[in-house]
């Protein structure tokens, strides 16, 4: 049995970590049995979630997990795509993960309201005296990462503009199709969906979320993916959820 380690459900989402959601969706696309358990990033061989335990073999990083699963279990999440379409899918995935994802995560970590109702709760289960230290360490790690990537060198409205450019691109690529690469979902849909759901969840408000709501094909796509891969999850994009 494959064990997928992630952050767990929360924030109006079946899984808080978009990269874990990507892997969970890809496991569902491949119809492989798996269970999801909660873990801390430090427990992962690469210091980030997700990672899997596949019969004793630990594999970290969603892209390498996909590679491992496709190779070991003999399936192809890009079935039916030609070489050019596969190249497009990879380019879209890189845009979503290495650019858009940062602009979508920025409101969670750098808008104080969102931070308090979101990441600040990560350590709620720890004894009270340990929480401030852990929170400070997380804030500092996140600040270093965002600065290294370059995102926090920009003003908030510039970050929104960058995120909106990616939303526009995704919306144009999707067009009237049900999924990014055509009539059936392929590998790249898993991360596009996970990042969009993470932005559209009503648990967090932000100017970029408002922008995303304006791309009606993207919000319908997010709903379609949620219904297909998380049919039992009660998903709503409406309003602003109260913090738990
Ligand atoms: N390239 C990685 C990115 C994973 C990632 O960013 N994971 C986040 C949670 S969604 C994480 O563990 N962050 C903690 C950290 O970077 O310290 C993948 O595709 O799995």
Image (cartoon, rainbow, N blue to C red):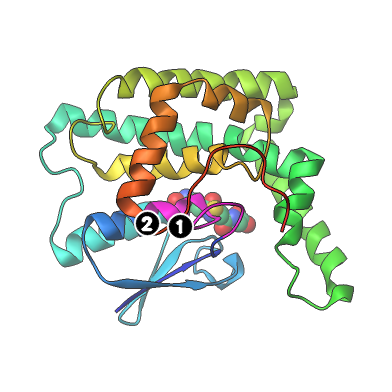
Label ID, residue 168: none
Residue 167: x, y in percent?
Answer: 48, 23
For residue 22: magenta?
yes
For residue 32, side relative to residue 50 (left or right): left
For residue 109, side relative to residue 105 (left or right): right
53 or 168, nearer to the observer: 168
Look at the numbered disc 2 and say if its residue's Cβ is closer than 8 Å to ligand 1.
yes
How packed mark 1 is, by other alpha carbons closer than 10 Å (few <14, some 14-19, many 20 or more), is many
How packed mark 2 is, by other alpha carbons closer than 10 Å (few <14, some 14-19, many 20 or more), is many
Highlighted range, magenta: 10-23
Query: Ligand 1 appears in which quadrant?
Result: bottom right
For residue 27, side relative to residue 94 (left or right): left
For residue 103: magenta?
no
Marks 2/1 in contact by CB < 8 Å: the verdict is: yes
Look at the numbered disc 1 and say if its residue's Cβ is closer than 8 Å to ligand 1.
yes
Quarter of image, res 51: bottom left
Kindly state the secondary structure of the residue where label 1 is placed: helix
Q: Is residue 119 above or below residue 95?
A: below
Label ID, residue 20: 1
Q: Residue furthest bottom?
A: 56
Quarter of the image where the N terminus is located: bottom left
Residue 8: x, y in percent?
Answer: 54, 65
Quarter of image, res 67: bottom left
Q: Residue furthest right?
A: 129
Label ID, residue 23: 2
User: Which residue is found at the position 55% from the left and 20% from the top?
Assistant: 164
Residue 76: x, y in percent?
Answer: 16, 51
């Amino acid at each position: 049995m494959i064990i997928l380690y992630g952050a767990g459900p929360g924030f109006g989402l079946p899984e808080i970590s978009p990269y874990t959601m990507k892997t969970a969706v890809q496991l569902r696309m491949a119809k492989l049995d798996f269970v999801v358990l909660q873990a801390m990033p430090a427990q992962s061989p690469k210091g980030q979630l997700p990672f899997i335990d596949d019969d004793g073999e630990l594999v970290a990083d969603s892209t390498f997990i996909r590679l491992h699963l496709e190779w070991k279990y003999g399936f192809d999440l890009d079935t039916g795509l030609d070489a050019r379409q596969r190249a497009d899918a990879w380019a879209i995935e890189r845009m979503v993960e290495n650019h858009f994802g940062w602009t979508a995560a920025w409101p969670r970590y750098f808008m104080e309201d969102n931070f308090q109702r979101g990441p600040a709760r990560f350590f709620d289960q720890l004894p009270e005296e340990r929480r401030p230290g852990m929170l400070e360490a997380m804030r500092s790690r996140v600040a270093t990462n965002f600065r290294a990537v370059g995102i926090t060198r920009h003003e908030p409205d510039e970050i929104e503009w960058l995120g909106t450019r990616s939303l526009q691109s995704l919306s144009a690529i999707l067009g009237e199709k049900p999924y990014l690469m055509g009539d059936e979902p392929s590998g790249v849909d898993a991360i596009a969906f996970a990042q969009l759901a993470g932005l559209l969840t009503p648990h967090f408000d932000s100017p970029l979320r408002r922008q995303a709501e304006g791309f009606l094909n993207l919000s319908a796509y997010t709903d379609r993916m949620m219904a297909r891969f998380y049919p039992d999850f009660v998903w709503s994009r409406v309003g602003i959820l109260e913090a738990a």
